[in-house]
Image (spheres, rainbow, N blue to C red):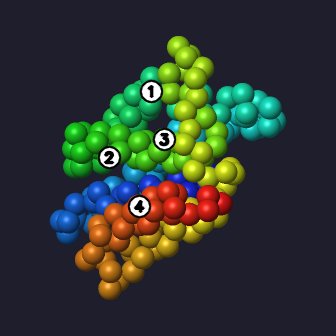
Amino acid sequence: MDIIGHAFAGVVLGQAAAPKSADRQLHTFTILTATGASLLPDLDAVSYIWGPDAFAAIHQKYTHSVFALGILVLAGAYVAWRIYPRAGFRYTLVLLTCALGVHVAGDLIAHWPVEFFYPLSRKGWTFGLIRQDFSLVVDMILAAGALLSFYDPLKPHRRVVALSTFGVLVAYLLFGPGW
């Protein structure tokens, strides 16, 4: 999945995970943290500076393995918790775990294989549900869900909107044309 899709998936996850309390700061923290964490594994995209061959050789290997994801979850949760300690470390840890899981799930639907056990194994995994790097339809579904979850009349139902967005996305991926 592309970076736009990952970002909107993080927003939708943040809307689904934010507590129902009236604490606006915690709500904002949850959305920003989920969005940032959903982008975190693609830090390896900086390798594109050295050209497309370097990018192809590095992307989805180092920062997408279970070892790196474990480090990213712990380090990211610690940093986010230090920025906003009122959220609690356990809440932040679970939020980052979910956000990184959504990122990896988003990458599994594409045609690029994810090497989960790199460097121990070079075997890549993919479901190949979209047949190109960037799926405009996936991005539009996630963007619509994210925007609808902020729409005033739907704010009380933001969790339903967010979870429905993921449901529509799964239905599209399983039964849609894959573009």
Residue neighbourhood size for the residue with mark 4, other residues' Cα within 10 Å, grouped as few (<14), some (14–19), many (≥20) = some
Residue 69 location, x and y as percent? 44, 31
What SS does tag 3 mark? helix
Mark nearer the N terminus (2 vs 3): 2
Q: Quick check: 27 above or below 100?
A: below
Q: Which mark is residue 50?
A: none
Few, some or many residues within 10 Å of mark 1 (<14, 14–19, 20+): some
Q: Residues within 10 Å of mark 3 (few under 14, many from 20)?
A: many
Quarter where residue 119 is shown: top right
- Label 3: which residue? 104
Q: Along the line of sight, which residue is nearer the eye, 26 or 160?
A: 160
How far is the residue under mark 2 from the one under mark 3? 14 Å
Secondary structure of the residue carrying tag 1 is: helix
Do residues under tags 4 and 3 come within 8 Å of each other at their CB atoms? no
Q: Which residue is mark 4?
A: 166
Residue at (18%, 65%) from the top-left corner? 21
Q: Residue at x 31, y 77 (%)?
A: 155
Q: Is residue 51 left or right of residue 151?
A: right
Considering every residue shown, the one lying at the far left of the view is 21
User: Above or below — where is 153 with respect to 3?
Assistant: below
From this viewpoint, which residue is outermost toward the front? 175
Kindly identify which residue carries mark 1. 66
Q: Position of residue 80 (x, y in %)?
A: 36, 43
Element class at badge 4: helix
Where residue 95 is drawn, which disc sits there? 2
